[in-house]
Image (cartoon, rainbow, N blue to C red):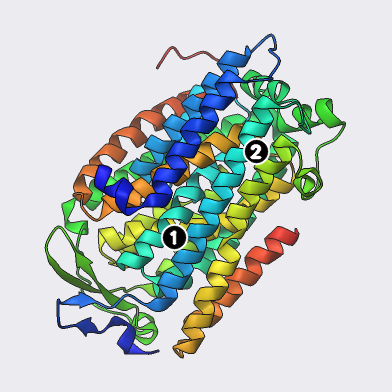
């Protein structure tokens, strides 16, 4: 950790400035209390959000899923914050670790710029459509819409967890059985230095056509649910297009940043992104994102996968329960 | 498409990293870090001054109470915004924070265009064009 802070002075500066800022905010707060929150509790929420966000960013970057996959379901499952607000902040959480980790990933050659731009167009179009539909649904369907969102998201999380489970350990360095014509034409092949093996791993992506169709769907669900879409970018790159897991994870972060950069603006312009709530999450994502990007090259990919599966299953349970409660008007005593 | 971007450097068997990727990553990296410092400054301004577009205590309480976005805005300023409201509020705590976040998101555009320039320079016209299309779509989203 000390070596990393010396090697990345901007990270050290960011951490120091953040600590100083939060100290000043606690000591000289001019905020007036309300019935719900005292100034101290408001500060505690901000600092708690920042710390949680930093942890989520590290896990998200290691898993290549984007923090939205963790943030959005947890907030929708365990708090009563408006779903539109959670989803817009979820996009901030999903994209900023991806944005800031783009630098280290590209310099290390872990993220593949050609794969990123090939997959970016369908993701962007899908994400923009998804966020527009989310805003429409929120404006027209109220609490029923919220319950449907929770239920659908719970179902999607179960699906994602199953994909990670069924993918198994063979997905770290997948070998394509056949390279299709389009993938050959696009020459989506490259190599990266695998630090944990001490050698270069070569790969050739395949099923480029199917991949782009799936990315359109991934973009839509990412924009709609505020997940960011990273949950499915890694499986599509890794399981469908046979890109090594580490390159998939790194490229996913970069792709997420591009896709969400389009999806976030409709939320922004409608005031659904409230800065005082989103800011500590954004700062945590940036600091955690840099930390995660420097750790990724050294960790075993399977460790991250197992951690994510457990979290996804737990959160999906809670979301499904809350969705059913909202739709049927019943109370299920679980979690 | 040039194969040389991916040829192996035999001295240490490490692949050469494409320059377009480095340009893209560096622009976004520094753009995001700059944006983060602005958001931190905005956060301090929000908490330690009363120069805010909307009272932060009201905002945080309303969010925590589960009020909808529409209710929060309507009760605070009369109506939900429809556009880049923060641009006219950059000297307030809320506006500076929102502006910082927007700047971070916006950094994707110069990043993509920088990478596109390098891809064209390397005669990778297909991927360069895809990058430009991506930038145009995102700019369309920004304009609304």
**Residue at label 1?**
A254
Identify which residue, A105 or A85, lies in the foreground. A105
Residue A184: % across, % down: 33, 84
Residue at figure coordinates x 37%, y 90% from the top left: B2
Residue B14 in view (yes/no) = yes
**Residue at label 2?**
B42
Residue A46 in view (yes/no) = no
Residue at figure coordinates x 29%, y 66% from the top left: A243
Residue A32: % across, % down: 71, 15
- How far separated are the C-alphas under marks 2 and 1? 26 Å
Mark 1, Cα crowd under 10 Å, few <14 / some 14-19 / many 20+, is many
In what element is the residue under mark 1? helix
Give the letter of the chain under mark 1. A
Q: Give above or below for A10 relative to A179.
A: above
- Disc 2 and disc 1 in contact, CB within 8 angstroms: no
Identify which residue, B32 or B105, lies in the foreground. B32
Q: Give above or below for A231 relative to B53.
A: below
How many discs mark residues in the rendered view?
Answer: 2
């Amino acid at each position: 950790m000390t070596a990393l802070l010396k090697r990345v002075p901007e990270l050290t500066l960011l951490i120091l400035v953040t600590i100083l800022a939060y100290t000043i905010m606690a000591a000289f707060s001019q905020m007036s209390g309300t019935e719900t929150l005292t100034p101290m509790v408001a500060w505690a929420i901000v600092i708690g959000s920042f710390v949680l966000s930093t942890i989520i960013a590290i896990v998200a970057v290691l898993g290549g899923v984007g923090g939205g996959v963790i943030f959005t379901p947890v907030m929708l499952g365990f708090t009563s914050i408006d779903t539109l607000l959670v989803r817009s902040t979820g996009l901030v959480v999903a994209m900023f670790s991806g944005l800031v980790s783009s630098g280290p990933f590209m310099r290390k050659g872990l993220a593949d710029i050609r794969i990123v731009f090939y997959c970016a167009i369908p993701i962007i179009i899908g994400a923009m459509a998804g966020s527009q539909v989310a805003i429409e649904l929120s404006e027209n369907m109220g609490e029923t819409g919220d319950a449907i969102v929770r239920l659908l998201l719970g179902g999607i999380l179960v699906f994602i967890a199953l994909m990670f489970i069924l993918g198994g350990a063979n997905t770290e360095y997948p070998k394509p059985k056949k390279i299709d014509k389009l993938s050959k034409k696009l020459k989506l092949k490259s190599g990266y230095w695998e630090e944990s093996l001490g050698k270069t791993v070569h790969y050739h992506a395949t099923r480029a056509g199917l991949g782009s169709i799936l990315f359109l769907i991934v973009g839509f669900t990412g924009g709609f649910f505020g997940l960011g879409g990273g949950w499915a970018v890694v499986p599509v790159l890794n399981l469908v297009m046979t890109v090594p897991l580490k390159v998939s994870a790194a490229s996913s972060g970069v792709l997420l940043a591009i896709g969400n950069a389009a999806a976030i603006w409709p939320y922004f312009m409608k005031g659904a992104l409230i800065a005082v709530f989103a800011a500590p999450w954004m700062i945590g994502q940036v600091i955690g994102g840099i930390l995660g990007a420097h750790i990724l090259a050294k960790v075993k990919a399977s460790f991250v996968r197992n951690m994510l599966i457990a979290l996804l299953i737990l959160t999906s349970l809670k979301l499904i329960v809350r969705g059913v409660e909202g739709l049927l008007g019943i109370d299920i005593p679980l979690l | 498409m040039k194969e040389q971007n991916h040829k192996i450097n035999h001295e240490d068997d490490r692949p050469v990293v494409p320059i377009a990727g480095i340009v893209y990553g560096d622009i976004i990296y520094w753009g995001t870090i700059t944006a983060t410092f602005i958001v931190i400054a905005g956060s301090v301004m929000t908490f330690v001054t009363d120069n805010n577009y909307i009272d932060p205590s009201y905002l945080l309480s309303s969010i925590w109470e589960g009020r909808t976005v529409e209710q929060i805005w309507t009760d605070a300023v009369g109506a939900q915004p429809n556009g880049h409201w923060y641009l006219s509020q950059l000297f307030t705590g809320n506006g500076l924070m929102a502006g910082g976040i927007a700047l971070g998101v916006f950094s994707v555009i110069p990043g993509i265009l920088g990478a596109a320039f390098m891809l064209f320079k390397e005669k990778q016209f297909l991927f360069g064009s895809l990058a430009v299309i991506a930038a145009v779509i995102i700019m369309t989203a920004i304009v609304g």
